[in-house]
Image (tube, grey):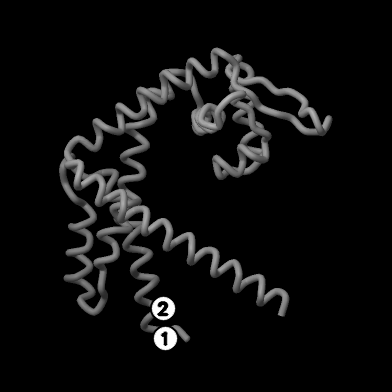
Amino acid sequence: MQTRAEAAAEAAGEEAVEEAVEVAGEAAPGSDSTAVIVDQWRRERPDLDATPMLVVGRLFALTDALDQRLRPPFAAAGLGNGDFDVLAALRRSGKPFALSAGELSRTVLVTTGAITKRVDRLASRGLVNRSVTANDSRGRLITLTAEGVAVTDELIAAHLANQRRLLAGLTEEDQAQLADLLGRFAAQLAAAEAEEAEEADEAEQG
């Protein structure tokens, strides 16, 4: 059972992470606002270990910073948030570049309702079309048009070039190490989520 002190420490840590995210967006270029916030917590609450924020706080801050730097090419192409995710999922699925709404939902990790809205926008621009599946008249396949393939190929090339530019300050060894660590962290979180879901199912059945 979690003690009151542990609960208070957890709450303080969550509040600190949120503060780190807010401040990071206002920090001067080149500054490490997360490290500053951790130092402040160490001064104000030396009984707490704020070092996890050096990872989690930075990940939050980087997510926002990367989105701001990677988004412009898609906005310039007239794509809404998440539209390119749909195009990319269809393109990398291989010929005939077609998936059902359910398959897109699982691939892009959003609801089928969100997929429908994105497909509507893309269809209105002639980048995808809908067709009835061969074995189920109620099902619909979303397929890239020729223009959709061309736009996606152009944008993915620009997107990858942009990512390489953002990582240019890290050596290839640094990038490989970071990729490995992030992969291990993602796997750890996925395993924990699966375990929690299994425990929840057992509790519900019990």
Q: Position of residue 47 (x, y in %)?
A: 24, 79
Could you say whether the residue bearing mark 2 is in a helix, strand or loop?
Answer: helix
What amino acid is found at the position of numbered circle 1 in the picture?
A: Thr
Residue found 28% across the figure and 58% down from its top: 55
Residue found 27% across the figure and 32% down from its top: 164
Alpha carbons under labels 2 and 1: distance apart: 6 Å
Q: Which residue is mark 1?
A: 3
What amino acid is found at the position of numbered circle 2 in the picture?
A: Ala
Q: Quadrant of residue 36?
A: bottom left
Does residue 121 appear anywhere in the picture?
A: no
Q: Which residue is mark 2?
A: 7
Image position of 17 (left or right of 36) = right
**Badge 2 density bin: few <14, some 14–19, many ≥20, Cα 10 Å:** few
**Mark 2 vs 1: CB contact within 8 A:** yes
Q: Quadrant of residue 116?
A: top right
* Image position of 114 with respect to 80: above or below: below
